[in-house]
Amino acid sequence: TPPAMATTMMAAPATAVALRAVRGRGLAALGTNSRQPVFLRRCIGSTTCAAASTQAGSIHHVSSSSSHQMPMIQQQPFSRAYLSTQPKTAEEPSAEEVAELGERIAKVSGRTPSILKSLPENFTPGLALSALQTESAGGAFVRLTDFRDLAQSSRAGHKRDARSILTALKDFKRCNSFLVDTRGARVAMEGMLRSMIPLNNEEYGSPTAVDKINASLYVLDAFSDTDTGLYYAAKTEYVEINMNLLLESVKEANLKLPAGFGEESGEDDEDGPEEEVDEDEDGSEHDEASAELARRVLHATRDTMAALIRRGSNPERDMSKRRSR
């Protein structure tokens, strides 16, 4: 074997042994001198280092007859030692640990925890609204996360929860300069729609088409109301979801406007002729209720389209500053 090849073959196992020793002893073996690892590598690579020669000779003695297979044999201890030192995958933290970590971060960052943390786990929107109104009294700002938690806590079939969400939108915008964002608008509209649709109808059992119409009208009226702030924050696709539900429910309920509706006025149904209803006929009250519901659907559709057109058109953008004012 040439001297250069023998030196290289002896240096490789010596390097593996030294690395295993350093990994086994940890950082304490390296000491406080920052130049010690460099010196260790120089000793391993040097042919005059006695320790490296001794370790290399002991390992090289295993297969002295077949020197061309030495590199493959000597790579196995190094690979096993390297794999044994790989860090283990950390276990996922529990919910309690995550909550405790969040509290610590809040204390360090100086941000006070939410008032909703003091409420029971399954709090209602009314309870959350009362707590937020008490905390934000005097014009203090309301967090967007607190409002989203309030809207997400709405229960299915509880109309009081939908009214609490609508009250929160109006009250926070008027008293606390609250500007709802896109996520908050989506959560609010979903929460109101979920709470307005009853789980069971007293007469028919399952929710009827009229129940769905009333729920859609409630959400669309909240959207077109400028006091809530939904008309600029809610995306058009959220409005289309309610409009599609309203359209399907109107077809299912077979609602129709009274005869001669809006023929004279063209716009307002109050000035137009009304259908003469015979009080002696059966189902006259039902027809009146259906006609009134059809009027509400028409007005809600007009107001929703007007709100979408108003926010879609921005004439001030192309005007000069004086005309814009």
Image (spheres, grey):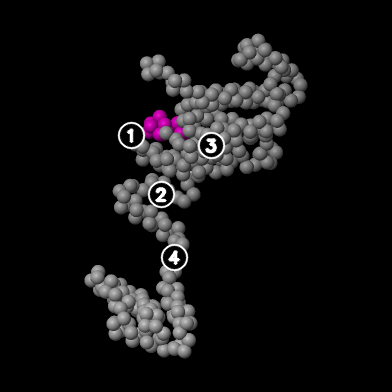
Q: Is residue 166 left or right of residue 50?
A: right
Q: Residue at x 43, y 70 (%)?
A: 86
Which residue is under mark 4? 90
Whether residue 123 is visible, yes or no, is yes
* Quarter of the rendering containing residue 204: top right
Q: Secondary structure at mark 1?
A: loop
User: Compared with residue 302, is residue 57 higher up or lower down, i.e. above or below?
Assistant: below
Q: Which residues are magenta?
A: 167-178
Which residue is under mark 3? 189
User: Compared with residue 105, is residue 43 higher up or lower down, i.e. above or below?
Assistant: below
Image spot of residue 175 (x, y percent): 38, 31
Question: Disc 4 versus disc 2: distance between alpha carbons?
Answer: 28 Å
> Would you say the residues marked 1 and 3 are in contact, meaning their CB atoms lie under 8 Å apart?
no
Image spot of residue 201 (x, y percent): 66, 39
Of circles 4 and 1, the one toward us is: 4
Question: Disc 4 versus disc 1: distance between alpha carbons?
Answer: 47 Å
Dot 2, crowdedness within 10 Å: few (<14), some or many (≥20)? few
Whether residue 17 is visible, yes or no, is no
- Disc 4 residue type (three-letter): Ala
Q: Residue furthest front?
A: 2
Which residue is under mark 2? 117
Q: Main secondary structure of the magenta part?
A: helix
Image spot of residue 297 (x, y percent): 62, 26
Question: Disc 2 versus disc 1: distance between alpha carbons?
Answer: 21 Å
Q: Secondary structure at mark 3?
A: helix
User: Compared with residue 181, is residue 87 higher up or lower down, i.e. above or below?
Assistant: below
> Would you say the residues marked 4 and 1 are in contact, meaning their CB atoms lie under 8 Å apart?
no
First reached walking from the N terminus: tag 2 or tag 1: 2
Tag of residue 164: none
Question: Does the magenta portion include 42?
Answer: no
